[in-house]
Amino acid sequence: MELSDANLQTLTEYLKKTLDPDPAIRRPAEKFLESVEGSQNYPLLLLTLLEKSQENVIKVCASVTFKNYIKRNWRIVEDEPNKICESDRIAIKANIVPLMLSSPEQIQKQLSDAISIIGREDFPQKWPDLLTEMVNRFQSGDFHVINGVLRTAHSLFKRYRHEFKSNELWTEIKLVLDAFALPLTNLFKATIELCSTHANDASALKVLFSSLILIAKLFYSLNFQDLPEFFEDNMETWMTNFHSLLTLDNKLLQTDDEEEAGLLELLKSQICDNAALYAQKYDEEFQPYLPRFVTAIWNLLVTTGQEVKYDLLVSNAIQFLASVCERPHYKHLFEDQNTLTSICEKVIVPNMEFRAADEEAFEDNSEEYIRRDLEGSDIDTRRRAACDLVRGLCKFFEGPVTGIFSGYVNSMLQEYAKNPSVNWKHKDAAIYLVTSLASKAQTQKHGITQANELVNLTEFFVNHIQPDLKSATVNEFPVLKADGIKYIMIFRNQVPKEQLLVSIPLLINHLQAESIVVHTYAAHALERLFTMRGTNNATLITAAEMAPFVEVLLTNLFKALTLPGSSENEYIMKAIMRSFSLLQESIIPYIPSVITQLTQKLLAVSKNPSKPHFNHYMFESICLSIRITCKTNPEAVGSFEEALFLVFTEILQNDVQEFIPYVFQVMSLLLEMHKNEIPSSYMALFPHLLQPVLWERTGNIPPLVRLLQAYLERGASTIASAAADKIPGLLGVFQKLIASKANDHQGFYLLNSIIEHMPPESVDQYRKQIFILLFQRLQNSKTTKFIKSFLVFINLYCVRYGALALQEIFDSIQPKMFGMVLEKIIIPEIQKVSGQVEKKICAVGITKILTECPPMMDTEYTKLWIPLLQALIGLFELPEDDTIPDEEHFIDIEDTPGYQTAFSQLAFAGKKEHDPVGQMVNNPRIHLAQSLHKLSTACPGRVLSMLSTSLNAEALQYLQGYLQAASVSLL
């Protein structure tokens, strides 16, 4: 694409269309942009548009499109074509920083993100002047520019907060510190001076405080991995200024908005974070400053109101106290009983209260409420922080703290009892306090794993939780109901099993509650109870114990999906999946109605898939229905196909990318259920599965390979007779996969199935070409993963076609090649093969080469006979060689940049492990002994003399053991 006005005009029109609400206009425009994004100059056209377009909406749209383009295409993935040509890359890096700095804030943010994506790949090696270019802009004095630089630096350096330590990382951070730490410190001091100069100018202060927030965030990122020498030397400057900013209160910066945090709150919360970082990680160096920070933060907590806008500040301030009180050498600050009482009374209890804002979220924004409360992403809520502070204090002062709170809990419960309908919030706070007091250690998977011995959890459960759940109306006091259900969920390991069994019908009943939070919690609690382990690793709650409730459980779960706000509720769908898995055969009578409801749901959500977890559990539930039913009645597979194929066809025709990998997995499961041959409905689809476009998407590869394997296992002869013209297409897929380091093993899965199942004559003409392709790949890039797969393949080939056929095909490609493969690949590398079945295939294959290949006994290949036998005994007896050379680094599917539907394995569509030599050979050691016996009968004396002169003593001893076990001897 040329950089011409005509192209700019075309691009403008298509960008406009991508904003159209009508999918008939929007989709084709998106497809067009997708089709041209590989063209040279495309990114430069976008940058030109966002610089020169007269329409603001086009500028913004171009900036977002550019950022997403960079996100999808900048990373260069090994084995894949470079998606952006080098000249475009150079031009982008040369222009993007000045363009970002001169753009309005909305566009600046998008370009800043793009710079950080490029920086993650190219900085510092391929973009050495980025830092200098940024630091030089600090001198400009223009805070719009300075903030642009700070924002970009923040998005570039914040990854230092969660990167693993490595020399590469340290080198990069050192480079950044050398160039950035001093200018940042000078900018910090200058900005603070400007704040006092402009103390009465509201608009100037807003810009300056935006800078200070970014500077404080950068401080956190640059200090996270270790305490840099520069910051240690300049701690006085930073900490004194941080402290004075914490205590600063400027009326001009206060906002009237009760919801949105203002600049002052955001800055103070970041400073609390920075202080907590130093108190936790660099406590010795930070000690001189700690007392004044504790005082300042304590005063902050006592004087800050209950409004939502202060939530982040209060929770960070409490987290600071929590991190300080857990450290042994700050213990003395909290020892006094009055201090503890004061913290409990003034900080913890007030911040555990259920506020009007929480009530509003509970009713009107339940998804966000659940996300915060259940999934632990309520890191920045007051309640979570107060709970962490209770845990922190209990580390050294469990007795006194439990004593102080017990008093509060009792008085709150008494208040509630006086007038439940008015005082229900008191009980809510009491339950929350008991929960935070009792839970010392918690995991998502097991709930509470360690509890406070001083709190009687069962007694509290029976007296205060169960009565709420037993009340006749499920819709009364929804917050307390949700609290009660959450209590069961959290303390499921502490409450005795008989109480859990009493709770199950109560939870099933609450699936009918109108409140989204209540019925979601009920579903989640049931799902968690069903995964608990009892003795012998079996589930704690058995299918027999659930028998009386099966019908009502399934009815209420599916009904809950029809309640307003829960049509795609992932917790309910996960509970459906888990119920199926626990109940097994008990669900068979309900399958017809269940599968109808699941397919209707599948059809509805396939129109616009938006909840990945919900979709995943839905497909898992479909797989479970198929497995459980077909286990007792294999014939039922047809009725599932009838129910599902219409929806599947629609998904494939409409190219619903998110669902296609799932559809292939379910189809594999269904096809594997057929015993004899492939039904015609599958054969009609077969040619479509070989279309290159399907194989372009990484997420499709594993399930498609498995589906093709199912076709080969069930209908190789049908393919050979009715679709022989498709065999080159099948091998074309193998050729594509084998060329990629990330997917070569999938290519071997396919090839192994072709070799194992296809009638030999149907692949005869292609065999030599297959080996040539494999050798080319071996020469170009030989990786451990490839070698392991290659070894399994050649041994499977040997098992299927015989050792002589293997030797002949190698030697037909190049004379004496068979010997080279034995010497350079099989003998030295066989120890690397892993997996029971894989090792067995290799053992049987090598046994055949040793005992059924005449050239091994009377040509120059004979010298390799003993080393090969020794390697085989090593495969049996030595530990697996799992070393991988340092330079081998595979990119996982998850690491592939941009949005690509990654492959999500369905657990319940799992494929049974298949052993191609299972019927032929049970014990490969005994098989070796019997085969050697047979060989020695054919040429008496030869085998024994070779063994006695050349095989090492230890291997010989093992071999004698095999011969004894097989009750045979050598002649």
Image: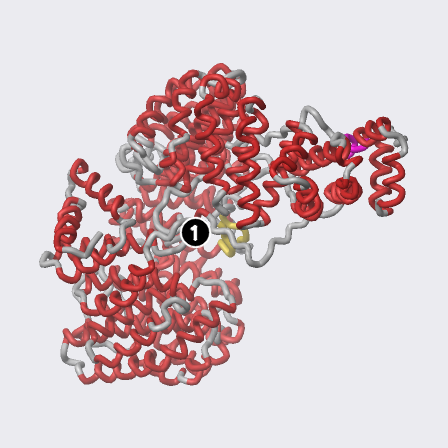
Of 393 and 577, nearer the camera is 577
Residue at the spot 54% in from the left edge and 29% down from the top edge: 754
Q: Residue furthest front?
A: 815
Residue 746 seen anywhere in this rendered image of the structure = yes
Q: Main secondary structure of the magenta part?
A: helix
Q: Residues within 10 Å of mark 1 (few under 14, many from 20)?
A: few
Relative height, residue 327 to residue 958 (above, below): below
The magenta stretch spans residue 944 = no
Position of 222 compared to 845: left or right? left
Colour mapping:
secondary structure
Residue at the spot 18% in from the left edge and 81% down from the top edge: 199
Q: Picture coordinates of residue 611 (x, y %)?
A: 33, 40
Which residue is labeled 1 in the image? 895
Mark 1, secondary structure of its residue? helix
Which residues fall within the magenta stretch? Answer: 925-929
The image quarter containing residue 604 is top left
Q: Residue furthest left?
A: 54
